[in-house]
Amino acid sequence: MNATHAVFNQSPPLEGVNLFEANRPLREALAHLAPTLDTAGLLELGAGAGSAEWQQHARLANSHPPVLHTHDRQGRRVDQVEFHPSYHALMGEALRHGLHGTPWARGPGAHIERAAGFMLFTEAEPSVLCPVSMSYAVAPALAGNPALRAAFGPGLAATAYDARFVPAAQKTALNHALTMGMGMTEKQGGSDVRANTTRAEPDGVDAWGERVRLTGHKWFFSAPMCDAFLVLAQEAAGLSCFFVPRFGPDGSVNAIAIQRLKHKLGNHANASSEVEFDGSFGWRVGEAGRGVPQILAMGALTRLDCALGTAGLMRQALSLAVHHTAARSAFGKPLVEQPLMQAVLADLALESEAATALALRLAAAVDRSEHGIEAEHERVLRRLLTPVAKFWICKRGSAFAQEAMECLGGNGYVEAGGEGVMARIYREMPLNSIWEGAGNIMALDLLRALRGADVAAALERESAAARGRHAAFDRRLALALQAVDGGVPEAEARRLVRDVALLLQAALLAQWAPEPVFAAFCDARLAQASDTWGTGLAGHDAAALVARAAPHPI
Ligand SMILES: Cc1cc2nc3c(=O)[nH]c(=O)nc-3n(C[C@H](O)[C@H](O)[C@H](O)COP(=O)(O)OP(=O)(O)OC[C@H]3O[C@@H](n4cnc5c(N)ncnc54)[C@H](O)[C@@H]3O)c2cc1C
C-alpha cells in the first residue's frame, strides 16, 4: 500500500536517558540527606532503568502476565507460577542492584541509597518490585526468630537471582538470593487482621524453633514463588506470626495450594494469588499472641516502599509529560510553551519534587534510626512519617497520573500493545494507596503515633528551616501543632495527615531546593486548597520550574 501521509508532530519514545543523572530534584535531595554517598551504583542503575532494553522487558512482562499451574499433566499438584523471561530479567536486575535485603548487611547510608534506587527502578517497572520490597522489609520482623534469621538473612542480601523452584538451602549453597512475601489478608478482613481465621496447631520443636501446622487461607498472597512468607494465624495465645517456607528443611514441598491468581487492574507483571494451607508447616517468629506488632515491623517498611514507588511513578509520568509536550506543537508552538500547559506541568513538577523529598526523608529516618544517628528524633520521625508519607504521596498518585496522562492527549490513554506507558502508570497508581494499609488505616495510624511520642517537638524541629519564610507556612504550622498537641477526632484525621505532609514537604524543600521552588510550593499547596492542577502559581516562573524537572534540556 502507498503511504497516504507522513507521520509528524508525534513525540519519539523517551529512552536512552540516564534516569538518575536526569533527575535533579532526586540528586539534590540525596546530596543533602546523604552528602558522602557514592552515587556510582545509582548512575549505573539510572542508565539501565532509562534504557530501551529495560523498557522492552517492562512491556513484555506486563503484556505476558504470569500463568498459574496448579497441577502437572498427570494430575499432581505443583502450585507454581510461570513468568515471562522479561520478568526474570527485571528481577535479576533489581536484586543485582541490591534493592532487597542488602542495606541490613551494610553501614550508614545504605537504606537511603537503596531508597533512591527503588525509585529509579520503579520508573522502569514497578510490579516486580513487590517481592523485592517484601524481601527488604522482612529483616526486622525475621529477627524475632534468630535461627531463621541466621538461615535466611544472608540469602536476603545475596544479589544473584535464582528463579528455580528448589529448597532455599540449594540457593544459599550457591550464594544465590532468597525472596520473601507476607500473608495477612483474609476474605473476611484485611485491615482488621485480628479477624483472621487461619489456625496454627503445635507440631513440636526443631532447629528452627517451635513448629506449627497451619490450616486456613489467605485472600491476597502476592509473589507466591517467593522462598518463604511471614503469615499470621490464630493459636491459643491469640494471633501470632509464623515463618512459612515453600519447602521444609528436609526438602519436602510445603502444602501451600495456590487456588488462583488475581485478575488485577494493573500490576500485571506481578502474580498476586489466593492460597490455602492444609497442614502447612510453619515456625514461630516473635512472641505467641504478638503477631500483629511482629508483622507490622515488616509492614512499616513496605509502607515506605509504597511512598518511594509512587514518587518514582510520579517522576516517570512527569518526565513523559514534559518530553511529549516539548516534542508536540499545537496552535503554533510547542505545547510545553503554552502558558496553561506550562502551569499544569509546573504544578506536577512541584508535586513530584515534594513527593521525592518526603519519601527520601522517611528513608533517611529509617537509615539514621537503624544506625543510632540522632536516634530519638529520627525514631519519632520514622514513626510519624511512615503513615503520613504512605497516605499523602500514594493518595496524590492517581490524580497526578490522570493529569499527566491528559498532557499526552489521546495517546496517553492508549496502550498500543504495552507501548503506551502512561496508561500502565495510571492503572498501577491506586495500588500503593490500597495495599499495606489503605488511606483511612494510615490516618488512624497517625493518631496512634501522636499518642506514643512528642510529635509536636519533632515537627517543630523539622520545620525550622521554613519558619518565618512564608506566611501560609507559619499559619498552617501553628494550626497543625495545636491539633497535634490537643488531638483531633477520628473523623478529621485525614485533614491532619494532609497538613502534616504538606508542611513537612515544604520544610524539606526549604532545606535544599532553590527558593522559587519553596515559594511556589507554599503558594500552591499551603496558601490555597490544592484541588485543581495548574492553579496557584500566578506570578511564579512556571517555565523555570518545568525546566528544572525536565528529563532532558527542552
Ligand atoms: C494487588 C494486591 C496485592 C496484595 N498483596 C497482599 C499480600 O501479598 N499479602 C497480604 O497480606 N495482603 C495483600 N493485599 C491485601 C491488602 O493489603 C488489603 O487489600 C488491604 O490491606 C485492605 O484490606 P481489605 O481489602 O480487606 O479491605 P478492608 O479491610 O475491608 O477495608 C476496606 C476499606 O475500609 C477502610 N477501613 C477499614 N477499617 C476502617 C476504620 N476503622 N475506619 C475507617 N475506614 C476503615 C479501609 O481503609 C479501606 O478503604 C494485596 C492487595 C492487592 C490489591
Image: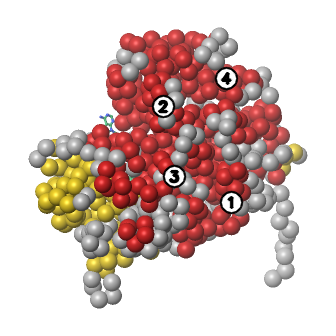
Camera-nearest label, 4 or 3: 3
Q: CA distance from mark 2 to mark 3?
A: 19 Å
Corner quadrant of residue 521: top right
- The image position of residue 188, as x and y in percent, is 23, 50
Image quadrant occupied by the N terminus: bottom right
- The image position of residue 319, as x and y in percent, is 71, 48
Does 425 sit above or below residue 191?
Answer: below
- Cβ(mark 1) to ligand 1 < 8 Å? no
Q: Are dots 4 and 3 in contact, CB under 8 Å? A: no
Q: Which residue is mark 3?
A: 102
Residue at image x 30%, y 54%?
147
Type of residue at label 2?
A: Gly
Q: Which residue is mark 4?
A: 510
Q: Left of 119 or right of it: where is 483?
A: left
Element assignment for label 4: helix
Camera-nearest label, 2 or 3: 2
- The image position of residue 327, as x and y in percent, is 82, 52
Name the residue furthest right: 332
Type of residue at label 4?
A: Ala
Element assignment for label 3: helix
Question: Going from the N terminus, do you reach mark 4 or mark 3 first?
Answer: 3
Type of residue at label 3?
A: Thr
Type of residue at label 1?
A: Gly
- Cβ(mark 4) to ligand 1 < 8 Å? no
Residue 372: mark: 2
Camera-nearest label, 2 or 4: 2
Camera-nearest label, 1 or 2: 2
